[in-house]
Amino acid sequence: MEKKETKDVMEVLSNLRDIIDHKPSTLKMYEEIQMMKFKIRPLQGDVLAINLNNERFLETLWSLGKLDEFFQREYGKMSKKDQEIFIRYFDNFYKNLQQELNKIKLYNKKNPPRTSILEMEIFKEKLLKKKVN
């Protein structure tokens, strides 16, 4: 039986840092975000009054998407012990990005809303694989 090669958690985390620290241009991030299939569902407030092209918003959303892609790709390639370390780091990084999203001022200055309350859900659309009979 062939033994599966495992990756060192420090190497994996270093690779993740390289990806997040070397962001592409805003236009490229926007294109990649579209390919990531993010969806925004308004829960409360006027979504039409916000600027979804806000550079900080795009950077944070792009980072969340890259974090998710990286996790999906690398998690299974580590030992159980390294997976535990990776999960702790991942959770912390994910929470920090979510907090950053909450702090971004998205309202257009030209068109301020009547109420400043805005709540929206951002999620990735997952495509279901069709089963072949």
Image (spheres, rainbow, N blue to C red):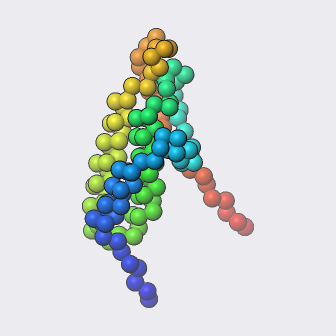
Spot the residue most to the front.
25
User: In front: 100, or 32?
Assistant: 32
Image point (37%, 29%), residue name: 104
In this view, the residue farthest toward the right is 133
Where in the figure is residue 35, as x and y percent of width and height? 57, 48
Looking at the image, is 39 positioned above or below residue 110? below
Q: Residue at x 49, y 26 (%)?
A: 51
* Residue 15 appearing in the image: yes
Question: Quadrant of the image for the N terminus?
Answer: bottom left
The part of the image, by quadrant, that contains residue 99 is top left
In the depicted structure, whether residue 110 falls above or below residue 38: above
Is 41 left, or right, of 3 in this rendering? right
Residue 43 in sight in this render: no
Residue drawn at point x = 60 percent, y = 52 percent: 127
**Residue drawn at 47 percent across, 44 percent down:** 25
Q: Position of residue 91 (x, y in %)?
A: 32, 50
Closest to the observer, 73 or 16? 16
Location of residue 132 with respect to 105 vertically, above or below: below
Q: Residue furthest top?
A: 114
Q: Position of residue 78 (x, y in %)?
A: 35, 69
Which sits in the foreground, 67 or 30?
30
* Residue 13: x %, y % from top left: 31, 60
3 to 40, vertically: above or below: below
Count all numbered tags in the image, as a single digit: 0
Image quadrant occupied by the C terminus: bottom right
